[in-house]
């Protein structure tokens, strides 16, 4: 846990500040004076001792005075536990210099839950440690906010509203060995490991679902557009729905059949008004562990699909939907590298241009779900960097330690 | 938008003004101008009148509401009204009914909507996600909302299109659509205020991934609480909270009911864990704790790759309503192999238990067992009291007959609680099923093309020929023992609603509506409605002091009905029960 330092996020103020600075000279004596409303409420003279330091001091508030401190900004990904211990309370504090900002509203991540700061500027939030994440924390409203009991001046408010920090949940990464690539001396092989807590399965890259696809045609053999293929379990509850067929009659859906179980097959057309089914009492068997193509020709009359070739043709097809945790490197655009799928112990190997590695790029981790048609993937297989793309909420700023 | 904003403001002001006169208001519909039902026992009708917040076109001046899914946030489904009694129930008749397909031809079959009634307006949803607002007394349609045609087309493709109702609060009417959107309509006008895709915030929550929505949302304290269906499609179940004001998330994250795939008991599973929360929670407004029931693990009949108890599937989970933080969780069925969801909404009771007053949470599972826990601690009070035939060996590839079948036990249909007798009434299903753990895959596969395996269809299993019926079981909460059990011709799929005169009203699949004397278990009134397949429980409310009963019926002629003393006693033609199979059950 040593890498988890208590850190304060001093915020780099954004471009918006240039504008503030330009009229800063005029307002040097009372930054908020230009706005009559806020000048009145944040008037320096009303309470010289308290508010002077906040919004009416002789010098404008400096960027580094604005502090959105989080008691912990990085967490080791921890497995889901029945007792809920993977959900952790975390706290933070909003300050201007050493003065707490009370009654400000904070938002955490995608949640729009209003978290109000207390009188001492503190606030609490919940962090789900079982999912990879980069969770932004930001100030969204200062309407009720006060410092030393005084409303916030306009200048300070603008700066507070542009502040943000983030909390990351990820598996720590350790490098174990860095060696020149045997194949290409301009490249290095970085041997590294994704580190989880004892007993945790940190790598579970595996097949998530198989694809059921195919073509739907009418009795004349013309592809039908906007048909939907539905499968539902004959003896249990559960179903999958295809994409609407395209102009070539092609549909897709992703499904994991349960141990070769009977499935009802339905095709709907005309916005669901017409439903075609298998003959009464018949069910479809979707084989395990393979993607399949089911090509269906609808009958000219009636709604019963004739369940034999050529009107119902079913063959296995390549490809599967994979899911799991992959590790990537933040490199400049145009730089290519390769990385292996972490094995059961979390070990993986990056092969990256030596000069890029020497710039100490940070890592990202992502839980990726992707359909791969042209090859079968397993632990240790090598992926090109083009395969990997971190999502918006994936942890992207991970520094590796040396084992 | 500006107009609707003004309306919301007015409604909020009205409800604020009322806080003083209904301190124990736990029917927190927010928009309700009238006193809460819980307060109405003492509040006179005149106290609840508030002309300013009542829609101008609505009949009546004083109202006692059915403001939320389960009447109150505790889900007791017990109203304090005394006008309708065992002695005069024969005077009940139809005040009005409406054929929903006549009102809009795009209404779909198979209605399961639980009405909500606020200030003389009945709000119902339909299969296919339309919403109607009716004048409760006259049946006048006040407004009607239907989803955009291109989206509705998408729902009807879904095949599963039932919806169990709306939530009303904050001047809005909330509904979840089959394709996982949350809709907010203006309560007065029915105009769309906002509509969000759940996947905007939780990207996996899509119909394509197997999630779908049938549940009524629940409104409390400015937040709309939602779960989802899809446990058997291998989704990761959740309960989530959205702000009523702008439909943005109100918790830091959803409460996920099972681990992420790859962790804990799903470390080696091919499947996501299931555990869908497909009915509304109960909320204790005194403590801020909410309670929801979690569905079965996936895959349902095959447990080898999901070792252990599989928390929190088949469980009741208590979390802080404001944050979603876990308080406690109790499991009904450990390592379920039979599709025994904890499906129906839990109830919070202030009941006499073992001679002492205690606040407890109760829930009846599809397992045919009924449970009670201490509301604060989750300590077991009554542990799995049977209310159905129970015989469920482990599934084998050859198949075993299990009781209850995959429909329950108690399905989504809610219980009611009668404080006078201290009885909980449980709607039950007796429908054993043949289930199999796995099949021989070789018999289905026929070698064909080189490099590929071809395969096809074969005959499906014939369901076992077994007797199917329903039950209503009265449990004495004090002793944890059955007081009696009533058999009904068809499975109980709608649920029950009770009154202070000791009556419990419930519908049946053949379209009959009945009143049961709670003390004795005798049916004291039965009426064949003009609809069939009543698959939702009644809501009971008053307008100008008169007591009304409303409910929906489904099947192929979905309707809404309103009954009261002195109504038309002409009965309908005998209805047909739709004893549909497992897939239909979770509509």
Image: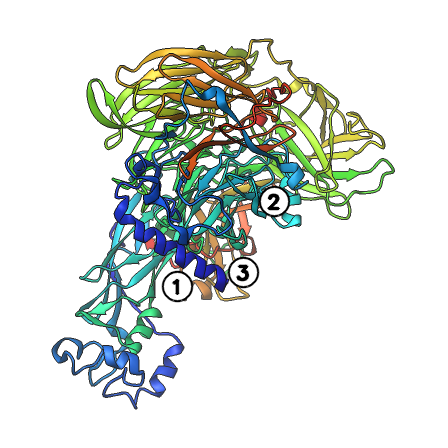
Q: How many marks?
A: 3
Quarter containing the C terminus of chain B: top right
The mark nearer the N terminus, 2 or 3, is 3
Residue B337 visible, this angle:
no
Is residue A292 in sight in this rendering? Answer: yes
Is the same chain shared between marks 3 and 1? Answer: yes
| Nearest to N terminus: mark 2 or mark 1 | 1
**Which residue is denoted by mark 2 in the rendering?**
A372
Q: Nearer the viewer, mark 2 or mark 1?
A: 2
Say left or right for A180 vs A273: left
Query: Residue A64, position in %: x, y?
Result: 26, 74
Specify the quadrant of the image occupied by residue B41: top left
Q: Residues within 10 Å of mark 1 (few under 14, many from 20)?
A: few
Please name which of the two marks, 2 or 3, marks the residue nearer to the observer: 2
Q: Nearer the viewer, residue A207 or A48?
A: A48
The answer to whether B25 is drawn above or below residue B391 in the figure is: below
Which x, y percent locates residue B445? Answer: 69, 22
What distance separates the C-alpha of mark 2 from that of mark 1? 31 Å
Identify the residue at the far right of this view.
A220
Mark 2: which secondary structure?
Answer: strand
Q: CA distance from mark 3 to mark 1?
A: 16 Å
The residue to which callout 1 is attached is A360
Please name whichever residue, B484 or B153, is drawn nearer the observer in this view of the structure: B484
In the rendered view, tell whether residue A112 sits above or below residue A223: below
- Residue drawn 40% across the image and 13% down it: B521
How dense is the environment of label 2, judged by Cα within 10 Å: few (below 14), some, or many (20 and up)?
Answer: some
As displayed, is residue A67 above or below residue B342? Answer: below
Secondary structure category for the residue under label 3: loop
Q: How is the image coloured?
A: rainbow
User: x, y (%) of residue B548?
Assistant: 46, 32
Instruction: Give me the disc on residue A336.
Output: 3
């Amino acid at each position: 846990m040593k890498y988890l330092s208590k850190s304060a996020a001093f915020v780099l103020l954004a471009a918006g500040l240039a504008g503030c600075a330009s009229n800063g000279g005029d307002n040097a004596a009372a930054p908020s004076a230009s706005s009559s409303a806020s000048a009145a409420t944040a008037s320096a003279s009303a309470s010289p001792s308290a508010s002077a330091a906040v919004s009416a001091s002789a010098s404008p508030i400096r960027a580094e005075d604005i502090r959105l401190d989080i008691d912990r900004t990085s967490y080791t990904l921890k497995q889901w536990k029945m007792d809920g211990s993977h959900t952790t309370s975390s706290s933070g504090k909003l300050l201007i210099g050493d003065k707490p900002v009370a009654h400000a509203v904070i938002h955490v991540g995608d949640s729009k839950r209003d978290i109000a700061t207390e009188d001492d500027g503190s606030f609490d939030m919940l962090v789900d440690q079982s999912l990879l994440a980069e969770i932004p924390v930001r100030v969204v409203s200062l309407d009720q906010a006060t410092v030393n009991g005084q409303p916030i001046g306009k200048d300070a408010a603008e700066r507070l509203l542009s502040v943000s920090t983030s909390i990351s949940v990820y598996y720590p990464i350790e490098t174990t060995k860095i060696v020149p690539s045997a194949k290409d001396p301009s490249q290095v092989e970085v041997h590294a490991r994704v580190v989880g807590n004892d007993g945790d399965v940190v790598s579970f890259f595996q097949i998530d679902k198989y694809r059921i696809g195919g073509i739907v045609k009418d009795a004349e053999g013309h592809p039908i557009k906007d048909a939907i293929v539905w499968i539902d379990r004959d003896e249990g509850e559960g179903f999958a729905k295809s994409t609407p067929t395209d102009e070539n009659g092609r549909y897709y859906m992703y499904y994991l059949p349960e141990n070769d179980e009977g499935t009802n097959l339905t095709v709907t057309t005309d916005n669901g008004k017409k439903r075609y089914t298998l003959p009464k009492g018949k069910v479809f068997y979707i084989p395990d562990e393979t993607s399949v193509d089911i090509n269906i020709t609808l009958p000219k009359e009636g709604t019963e699909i004739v369940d034999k070739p050529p009107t119902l043709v079913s063959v296995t097809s390549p490809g599967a939907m994979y899911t799991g945790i992959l590790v990537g490197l933040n490199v400049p655009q145009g730089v290519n590298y390769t990385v292996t799928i972490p094995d059961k112990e979390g070990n993986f190997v990056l092969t990256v241009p030596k000069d890029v590695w020497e710039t100490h790029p940070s890592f990202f981790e992502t839980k990726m779900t992707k359909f791969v048609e042209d090859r079968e993937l397993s632990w240790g297989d090598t992926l090109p960097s083009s395969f990997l793309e971190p999502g918006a909420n994936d942890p992207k700023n991970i520094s590796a330690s040396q084992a | 938008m500006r107009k609707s904003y003004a309306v919301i403001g007015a409604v909020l002001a009205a409800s604020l003004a009322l806080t003083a006169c209904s301190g124990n208001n736990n029917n927190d519909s927010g928009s309700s101008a009238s006193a809460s039902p819980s307060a109405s026992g003492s509040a006179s009708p005149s106290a609840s009148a508030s002309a300013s917040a009542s829609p101008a076109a609505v009949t009546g001046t004083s109202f006692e509401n059915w403001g939320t899914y389960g009447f109150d946030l505790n889900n007791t489904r017990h109203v304090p009204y005394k006008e309708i009694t065992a002695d005069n129930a024969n005077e009940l008749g139809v005040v009005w009914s409406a054929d929903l397909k006549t009102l809009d031809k795009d209404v779909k079959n198979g209605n399961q909507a639980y009405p909500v009634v606020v200030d003389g307006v009945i709000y119902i949803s339909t299969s296919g996600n339309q919403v109607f607002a009716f004048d409760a007394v006259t049946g006048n349609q006040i407004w009607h909302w239907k989803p955009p045609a291109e989206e509705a087309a998408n729902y009807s493709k879904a095949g599963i299109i039932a919806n169990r109702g709306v939530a009303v609060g904050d001047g809005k009417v909330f509904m979840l659509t089959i394709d996982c959107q949350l809709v907010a309509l203006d309560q007065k006008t029915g105009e769309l205020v906002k509509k969000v895709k759940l996947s905007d915030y939780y990207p996996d929550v899509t119909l394509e991934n197997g999630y779908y929505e049938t549940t009524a949302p629940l409104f409390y304290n400015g937040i709309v609480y939602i779960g989802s269906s899809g446990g058997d499609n291998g989704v990761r179940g959740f309960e989530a909270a959205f702000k009523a004001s702008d439909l943005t998330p109100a918790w830091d994250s959803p409460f996920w009911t099972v681990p992420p795939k790859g962790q804990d008991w799903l470390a080696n599973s091919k499947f996501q864990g299931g555990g869908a929360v497909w009915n509304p929670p109960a909320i204790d407004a005194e403590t801020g704790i909410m309670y929801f029931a979690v569905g079965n693990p996936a895959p349902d009949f095959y447990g080898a790759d999901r070792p252990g108890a599989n928390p929190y599937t088949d469980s009741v989970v208590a979390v802080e309503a404001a944050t979603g933080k876990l308080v406690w969780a109790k499991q009904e069925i450990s390592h379920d192999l039979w599709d025994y969801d904890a499906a129906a909404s839990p109830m919070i009771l202030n009941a006499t238990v073992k001679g002492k007053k205690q606040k407890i949470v109760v829930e009846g599972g599809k397992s045919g067992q009924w449970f009670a826990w201490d509301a604060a601690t989750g300590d077991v009070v009554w542990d799995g009291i049977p209310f159905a035939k129970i015989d469920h060996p482990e599934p084998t590839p050859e198949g075993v007959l299990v009781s209850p079948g995959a429909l329950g036990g108690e399905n989504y249909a809610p219980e009611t609680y009668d404080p006078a007798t201290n009885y909980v009434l449980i709607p039950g299903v007796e429908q054993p099923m043949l289930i199999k753990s796995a099949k021989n895959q070789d018999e289905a596969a026929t070698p064909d093309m080189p490099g590929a395996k071809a395969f096809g269809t074969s005959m499906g299993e014939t369901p076992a020929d077994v007797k199917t019926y329903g039950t209503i079981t009265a449990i004495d909460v004090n002793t944890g023992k059955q007081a009696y059990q009533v058999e009904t011709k068809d499975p109980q799929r709608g649920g029950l609603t009770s009154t202070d005169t000791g009556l419990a009203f419930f519908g049946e699949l053949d379209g009959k509506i009945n009143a049961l004397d709670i003390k004795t278990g005798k049916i004291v009134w039965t009426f064949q409605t003009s609809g069939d397949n009543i698959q939702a429980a009644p809501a009971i409310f008053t307008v100008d002091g008169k007591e009304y009963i409303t409910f929906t019926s489904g099947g192929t002629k979905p309707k809404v009905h309103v009954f009261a003393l002195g109504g038309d006693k002409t009965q309908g033609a005998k209805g047909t029960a739709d004893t549909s199979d497992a897939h239909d059950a979770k509509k």
